[in-house]
Amino acid sequence: MPYQQSQQPLTFSELGLTIYDSLENHRDRWLSTRQLESSLQEKLAGLKLDQPIRTRSKVVKAAICTALGYAIPKTFLKTQPRFPGQDLDVYVQKSDNLQIWNEELSPVRRYVLIRVDDHDVVTMVRVITGQQLGRLDSTGTLTQKFQATAIAEVNHSRLVSPNDTPDLMFAMEESRSAFFRNLLPIDKLFVRLEPLIGTFLDNPGADQERNRGWGLHQVVSSRLGLAKAEDDGQIPDVRAQLLELKLQTSPTVDLGLISPGDTEQLGGVEGLRFADIRYGVFYATLIENQIRIDHLVLTTGADFFCFFRKMAGNIVNTKNQIRLPDSIWEKPK
């Protein structure tokens, strides 16, 4: 009998199975955690991921499809998890702070953790279950995070609030405190900041939001005549002018843990609320390795949602933050 070469099993693509299709009738095609990790480590190692975050997400998912033998869909759906057929989710990690948005950990789900170095090159891929991640979650709680977007397209600078809130105006007029006497009224603050339009900032990278924001913080502080930029991680960013800063290269404004207009007491400033602070939202464009400031929207917290709207769907987005130990990146024996 002539020798016949054994046939390779059909790929998911050849079977007509997409990443979204259940494997209930193809249980033999369910990939074990070890198989997933081995295939993805082999195929993804060395992949360059220096794209903007949204583009990077598509590049990573496409690479995983190819590595596992799935066809790359024309459009990646916003499902949870991202690869329902294999109950698989994906996270690219330059830091050891894993953030899982808007859902609790699923014990049986597999989480692909892709480690990239300082040059955005994939160095290690680990696949672990939600049960394993759960052992690393010391709090078991979700951190709330507010987000918003402009009601209309932002194509020019805008002073939303012609005046500060009544409480802040009263404090500036009546208080004997040097702090309040040194505050610029919001209309004068706008005039002082508007010349920053056209300024270029260094771009430390698409996934370095905090460092990009610090660049804005420095030029704003200089423009306001402050001796140096200071950041204690609290709201507002520029405390000397009760000014919270946002640098936008995308439509979504990340508001953190405090919603503008909140009437809770502002820590460290007697008699004022979060609604009384000023929000400077700087819209910008990425140009190669720089960021160009294009427009400024300045508003009080109380008036913030006259110009912006809360994100549709989840008014409050949540994230589960887990500190990944160094040992998680050690190659399994």
Image (cartoon, rainbow, N blue to C red):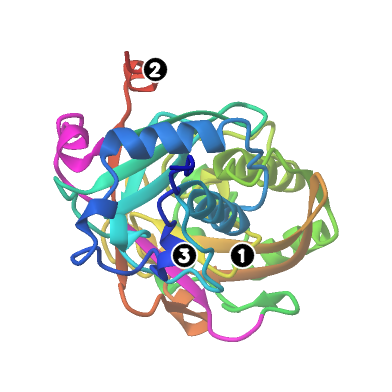
Q: Mark 1 — residue? A: 250
Q: Position of residue 265 (x, y in %)?
A: 28, 56
Q: Is residue 292 left or right of residue 180?
A: right
Q: Mark 3 — residue? A: 14
Number of the front mark, 3 or 2: 3
Tell me, for residue 331, which label it has, or none.
2
SS at badge 1: loop
Vertical position of residue 42 compared to residue 187: above or below:
above
Q: Residue at x 67, y 78 (%)?
A: 154
Query: Is residue 98 at all visible to an observer of this figure?
Result: no
**Which comes sooner in the sequence, label 1 or label 3?**
3
Q: Residue at x 45, y 49 (%)?
A: 7
Is 131 one of the magenta-colored residues? yes
Q: Residue at x 14, y 45 (%)?
A: 107
Number of the front mark, 2 or 1: 2
Q: Residues within 10 Å of mark 2 (few under 14, many from 20)?
A: few
Q: Amino acid at mark 3?
A: Glu
Is 199 one of the magenta-colored residues? no
